[in-house]
Image: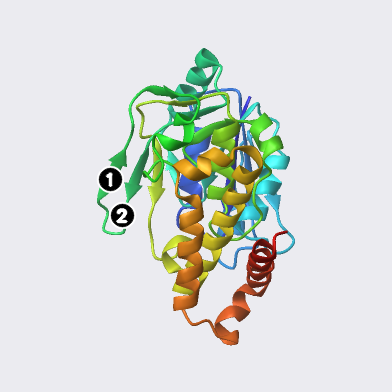
Amino acid sequence: MVTIVITAYNVENWIAKAIESACRQTFDNLEIIVVEDCSTDSTREILSTIDDSKVKIVYNVENLGAGASRRKGIEAANGEYILLLDGDDWIEEDFIERLYNKAVQEDADIVSGGITIIHKDGSKESASYGNCIMEGDDKITRFWGEKIVFMNNKLIHRRLHEKVPYCVRRFIEDTPVIIPMMHLANKVVYIDNTGYNYRMHEKSLTHSASDLKYALFRALCAEDIVRFFEKHDKGILERLPFAEAYSKCIYDIKECNPTAEMIAPYKEEWIEFTTKLIGRIVGD
């Protein structure tokens, strides 16, 4: 079985298409878990009209954010493999079947497709790295920094989710999960398919974040990755610029000249950031 986990918050214009694309998959052994995160628009009402036995809807009793909502959906999943889908994106009808068949064929923990980005003006940009199998350091180093180092276009074995629980932050929460997963995976297989459609719009978290929010959450992400590799493979830190990225985020935060008013919306994350930074300085 494959589980598709869809997170839904204020996506009234797109959630029906996301769910429809999941329900129309050519792969049959499928469950779809939608986690509704206390939307303030008509998303919840739209979900109440869904009538498909494959679809299970989980309603949060309070707004948890993207990270905690995804973890909730993953923990409820029964599938051997799991794919994440944002409520404003959609997948082509053969996407799961092609990924799953390759996963079985190669006995792979992770199989990745490419991605089609739909820009705000309606133009499209597709990225794929063809058909290839990555093992060893290449699992991370081969395509680091490219567009498809992205979690949602990947079918991931549930054992990796058990080893690397999903990050519960509200922003930039997928990168500190997928990088460790790729390192722990037996192999990462790519197929030449751009069937994940990623919609860019002004309401998305990525495109509405302030400079401070972006720098702060990137710093927390970089800190998580550095700590993971300090524990599992320090050599990676010499071959990829994770430590440098962390330093750059700290510099960017400083350049924002953060005030108490600017920090207030991200108080918990600010405390986490400063605590970990101080711990690193004094040698925790």
Residue for point 52% across, 50% down: 87
Residue 125's disc is: 1
For this view, does 46 lie left or right of residue 193? right
The outermost residue toward the top is: 105
Name the residue tied to disc 2. Answer: 119
Q: Position of residue 43 (x, y in %)?
A: 56, 58
Q: Quick check: can you spot residue 82?
A: no
Q: Secondary structure at mark 1?
A: strand
Question: 137 and 18: which one is in front?
Answer: 137
Residue at position x 48%, y 44% in the image: 238
Q: Please, is residue 41 above or below residue 234 in the view? A: below
Q: Quadrant of the N terminus?
A: top right
Image coordinates for residue 204, horizontal then vertical, percent: 46, 61
Q: Could you tell me the amino acid type at mark 2?
A: His
Residue 276 pos. (x, y %)? 67, 63
**Sooner in the amino-acid sequence: mark 1 or mark 2:** 2
10 Å crowding of disc 2: few (<14), some (14-19), many (20+): few
Name the amino acid type tagged 1.
Answer: Glu
Q: Residues within 10 Å of mark 1 (few under 14, many from 20)?
A: few
Task: Say which element carries label 2.
Answer: loop
Relative to the observer, which residue lies in front, 110 or 78?
110
Most extreme residue toward the front is: 282
**Mark number, residue 12:** none
**Cα gap from disc 1 to disc 2, whole angstroms:** 8 Å
Q: Is residue 62 left or right of residue 178?
A: right
